[in-house]
Amino acid sequence: MSTQYWCETAWVGGAVASGVLLTADDTGTLTSVETGITAAPTGAEVVPGFTLPGGVNAHSHAFHRILRGRTHGDGGTFWTWREVMYSVAARLTPDNYETVARAVFAEMLAGGYTSVGEFHYVHHAADGTPYGGEDGTPYGAGSGVSPDSAGSEPTGTGRAHAMERALARAAASAGLRIRLLDTCYLTGGIDTELSADQARFGDGTIDGYLDRHTSLIEDFASEFPVGAPGESFVHVGAAIHSIRAVPAANLPRFTELSGPVHVHLSEQPAENEACQAAYGTTPTQVLERAGVVTTDLSAVHATHLSDEDIATLGQAQASIVMCPCTEADLADGIGPARELADAGATIAIGSDQHVVLDALRETQGMEAGERLRTGQRGRFSPAELIASLTEGGAKSLELPVGSLEAGKACDFIALRTDSMRTFGSVGEQIILSATAADVHTTVSGGRVRVRDGVHTELGDISELYAKAFAALGMESSSHG
């Protein structure tokens, strides 16, 4: 059986097309994309407005969403914000993290994203004990306890990779395509042991990380098998938390891995200063010496770069994940996105700590930052901005999404063109006028997931957040 959507207008092949008929097979994979179809065929769902390929959120920390609107009272810095973040991380268990992530992932879909790169480092129990079997084996099959008759999965010490499974289940249940970026986090700073707050992030040694990573891939291959593009919702990748968190001597081991590798890079001047003091060069050049700066690398933030750094990342055709709303919120600065793109890097978009989950505002934020930084308008054309949100993220995460074409997943969002925000917008320039409030339909795997801000299966997203805050034992609002 096939599913058809007739789109009033859509972004196809880098241009606006009218009367676009999308046909997907029973796996949720596009089998044909036809333009110039003047009327919807019988049985096709009519999609008014302007249809875009689903946004790709190339950098997310799901639990950071809990901090939204709760860290501004005393001003603070990136480093004081981080202490609040650690306090939330300490509350996470496999059960409540699944509840939290389900709400966050549903909001992502409502906000215009259909795929996410989840940069995940909360691997273990709060004291650093790995989830796994009672026999003391840290990874592998666990205790052998089977799911109960209701289909729920045991967590706690009963299953290895319990936190990773929680995120994967949450994404799959929401209908959000996920690349789980399994993150290596070994030190609290250069030549500094992990703190008590960071104990659950670490694997002890690089071999410990690689052993757990291999086990995760093997477990997920059977539990979340990869099939046709449209039906494959869970994928695994790797990440280096930062130069602060992985010693330079360990970095070459990441060349042993295949697929995408992500890293927080030069987000703060203090990171660069510490790296210069320890290694005599910048974080980018430390990565380059280790051999990990390739087209598979995604550098997140890349805010404070030298000209040499820009040339290195561009020559490698690496991906750069800009997170404009978070970078503004944390006063990180404005990275050289245009210069990186001109050097040969691919630009992608991420929401990081989810100051907003609005694919349009995040994309607009990158262009706004460029204009403020340079005093020039039109640093990125509307077409380039759309590409960053869609194709750029698809490359960063190596997912079969990012464009409306046969063989890709049937993932798209549809924007109102007649709202008070978008009325009068010309063609693709709507990317600079619309917000998440204009996303009236989100489809992934050929199925409508969100319609008019309500998840079609999970319901009201605010109610999902009420359950999430309750699960964490936190008040839903802060009263000072």
Image (tube, grey):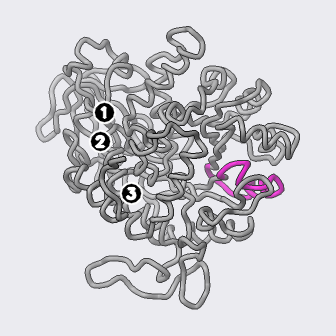
Asked if labels 2 and 1 touch by Cβ distance under 8 angstroms, the answer is yes
**Figure check: 18 above or below 479:** above
- Residue found at x 60% / y 72%: 128
- Dot 1 amino acid type: Ala
| Magenta-drawn stretch contains 249 | yes
- Dot 3 amino acid type: Ala
- Residue found at x 45% / y 58%: 234
Q: Secondary structure at mark 3?
A: helix
Which residue matches tag 2? 110
Q: Nearer the viewer, residue 118 or 343?
A: 118
Which residue matches tag 1? 436
- Residue found at x 31% / y 12%: 426
Tell me the distance, in whole angstroms, between the alpha carbons under discs 1 and 2. 7 Å
Asked if labels 3 and 2 touch by Cβ distance under 8 angstroms, the answer is no
Which residue matches tag 3? 101
- Dot 2 amino acid type: Ala
Identity of the residue furthest to the bottom in this view: 135
Residue 56 in picture, x, y percent from top left: 45, 40
Q: Residues within 10 Å of mark 1 (few under 14, many from 20)?
A: many
Residue 36 in picture, x, y percent from top left: 26, 22
Tell me the distance, in whole angstroms, between the alpha carbons under discs 2 and 3. 14 Å
Tell me the distance, in whole angstroms, between the alpha carbons under discs 3 and 1. 19 Å
Magenta region, residue range: 241-260
Q: Nearer the viewer, residue 420 or 10?
A: 420
